[in-house]
Structure formats: structure tokens, C-alpha cells
Image (cartoon, rainbow, N blue to C red):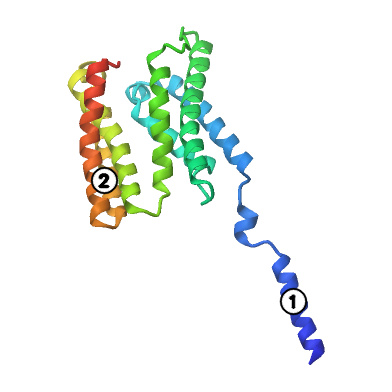
Amino acid sequence: MNSTLSSAGVTRAASSSVPGPESGSAVPPFARCTMAVTGAVLAGIATSFGQAVPGLSSISNAAGPWFVVAVLLVLAAGITRGGRRPRLRTALAMVSGVVLLELMHIGYWAATNLRGYVDTLSITNFWVVMALPAGLLAGAVALALRSPDGRWRGAAAGVTAAVLVGEGARALLQVAASTGTVTWVVQIVVGVAVLVAGIALARSPIGRAVALGVGVVGSVAVFVVYAVLGAG
């Protein structure tokens, strides 16, 4: 009987020391951040080269896809994970959104100049300046997407949809004559799909109302901001 218990104890001890699937596949925080930073620079480089491709030139000049990429990179960095120090996590996520967007600008600037075109990276550049509020918003959206509260998830989907739909609608009315309509129609359709997904995933009447309200009001707000600032 004693030998049986001892064997069982040894078996339990041995099994507890073996790392499970989660611990073996976990990516260290530093590696996550490195991949996010690298991804941001590569996204900027890809944008520069994409502007030379006829089928990709319009989407490469759009801000909506950059916003979505920034949100995804903040999520990939793993900053939104964990339950400790929520205020610190919120601040880090929002600051990371700004940093990643600016790194995308740096990648775009470097690739454009290496391709033989003049591009100036200045703190007064319109898009460099806009990366501050857009990056803060992207970080907040990434954080809200991981919230257990359906209202926050709905709001995050609404904001993302608003950026895509608002920019797409403005482009259709003001720049489609020179860029074509396909890109902007596709962007609007994607934005609507994100909103529908957000409404479905909110899983509560209030969450769905928040997603719809933020999406509709936000789209109008984005459209107005573009029209007032005259962003190209």
C-alpha cells in the first residue's frame, strides 16, 4: 500500500513539472512587443510600395486601414492582457497606439525616400500630428475589445466601423473622381461588417445599442472632421 502511494506521488510530481500546452506556447512579453514594433515599421514600408501598385494605390493612401493595423498590433503586443493595474494597462495601450502609428510613419518615410521620392517626416506633418489622437483611440479600442463588458466591446466595434465608414463616405463624395470608387465602397462594406459583428458580439441589448450608436454617430463625426480639415 505504501509503495502504491509513493508511486502515485512520484507520478503526480512528475506530471506537475511538465509544462502544459499553454506554458510551452506562451510568447514572452518582450518578443510580443518586438513583433508589434517590427510589424508597424513593415506596415509603413508596405504602404509606400503599395502606392506604386495600381490596384492598391487608393487603399495605401487611406487612413482607415492604418487605424485597424494599429489596433491589431496593440493586441498582438499583449499589452491589453492581464487584470492587474488596469489604469497602467490603459495608459500603456493608448501610448503604444501612438508609438506604433508613428513607427508606421517612419517606415513609410524611409521606404519612400529610398525609392527616390521626397517625403519629409516633420512634427508639423498633418498625418504625424493626427497619429496622436488616432493612436490614443486605437489603444483604447484594443483594450475595449478584450473587455468582458459587452458595452465596451460594442463601443470598440462602433469606433472601428466609424473610422472606416466615415473616411470611405467622405472619399466617395470628394476624391472618388481621381481615385475611383471601388476602394471606398469596399472600405465602407468592411466597416459595416465590423459594426454588424460588434452588434452580434455585444450579447446584450445595451451593448448592441452602444455599438450601433457609436458606429452611426462616429461615422458622421469622422466625415465632418475630414471635411473640415480637408485631409487629402
**Front tag of 1 and 2:** 2
Q: Residue 160 shows which numbered tag?
A: none
In percent of width and height, residue 197 lies at 29, 49
Mark toward the start of the polypeptide (1 vs 2): 1
In percent of width and height, residue 79 lies at 52, 42
Q: Residue 11 shows which numbered tag?
A: 1
Q: Is residue 140 left or right of residue 1?
A: left
Judging by the rendered image, the residue that carries numbered circle 2 is: 211
Q: Which image quadrant is residue 168 in? A: top left
* Disc 1 crowd, CA 10 A, few/some/many (<14, 14-19, 20+): few
Q: Nearer the viewer, residue 91 or 24?
A: 91
In percent of width and height, residue 4 lies at 77, 87
Q: Which image quadrant is residue 36 in? A: top right
Residue beneath the point at 27% across and 57% down = 204
Three-letter amino acid code at the position of disc 1: Thr
> Cα distance, mark 1 to mark 2?
51 Å
Let me know if residue 65 appears in the view: yes
Residue beneath the point at 51% across and 24% down = 103
Hey, which residue is sitting farthest right in the picture? 3
In percent of width and height, residue 98 lies at 46, 28
